[in-house]
Amino acid sequence: MTQAILDILHDVMTSPWIYLALFALAMLDGFFPVVPAETSVITAGVFAAATGAPDLFLVIVVAALGAFAGDHISYAIGRTTNDRLRNGRRSRKAFAWAERALAERGGLVLVVARYIPGGRTACTLTMGAVAYPRRSFALFDAVAAVSWAVYSGLIGYVGGAAFENDPIKGLLLGLGIALGITAVVEVVRYLRHRRTAPQVKAELVTSRD
C-alpha cells in the first residue's frame, strides 16, 4: 500500500504538469481556502530532496506566483462585494478587526495573516473591501507570497533530506513541522489577545465616559 502511494506521488511529482498544478492550487487557495496548496508545496519539496524532481526553485517560483494571483482575485472579490461583507453579521467583527490592524500595522498584516489558518483569505477580502491601495497591497502581497512559498518548499525539502530513502516519513516530518509552527503562532496570538483584551475594554469604557 505504501509503495503504491509512493509510486503515484512519484508519477505526479515527475510530471511536467506538476508546476501548472502547483500554480493552480496556490491560486485557488487565495479565495477557496479548502484547497491543500501548502500540503502540495511541502510534498513537492520532499520529493525535490528525495528524488531530485521536481525542481525546488521552480516549485517555489510557481507557488509564489499562484499565491500572488489568488490573493489579487480575493482582493477583487472584496472590492465588488464591499457592502455585503460590511453588513454581514459574521463579517462585521472581521471588518472592525481588519481596519484596526491595518491602521496599526499597515500592509504587514497581510504578511502575518499568511501563516494564520483562514487568515489569508479573510485579510485579502477585507483589504479589498476597505479599498486598501492596490499598489501597496501588491507590494506587501509579493513579500507574503514569496515568504510562504519559500517556507513551504524548504520545510518539505528538509523533511525529504532527513528521510531521503523514505519520502513518506519525510512528508510526515514536513507536515509535522508546519503544524507545529502553526500551533505556536496560534498560542502566541491567543496569549497576546488575553493580554490586550482588558486594556481594549478599559479604553472603550473610558471613551464612552
Image: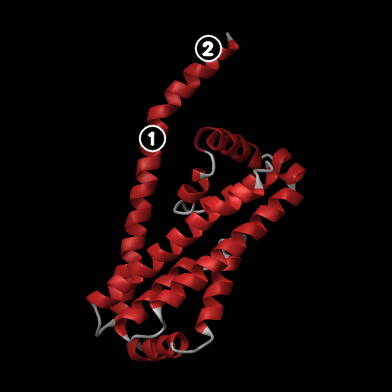
Q: Amino acid at mark 1?
A: Arg
Q: Position of residue 147 (x, y in %)?
A: 43, 59
Secondary element type, mark 1: helix
For the C terminus, give its image quadrant.
top right
What is the crowding at mark 1: few (fewer than 14 residues within 10 Å), some, or many (at least 20)? few
Give me the residue at 71% from left, 40% from top. 86
What is the crowding at mark 2: few (fewer than 14 residues within 10 Å), some, or many (at least 20)? few
The residue singled out by tag 2 in the image is 206
Nearer to the camera, 165 or 152: 152
- Residue 123 marker: none
Residue 7: quarter of image? bottom left
Q: Is residue 117 left or right of residue 166?
A: right
Q: Is residue 197 left or right of residue 85?
A: left
- Which label's residue is closer to the chain start, 1 or 2? 1
Q: Is residue 57 left or right of residue 25?
A: left
Give me the residue at 24% from left, 85% from top. 165
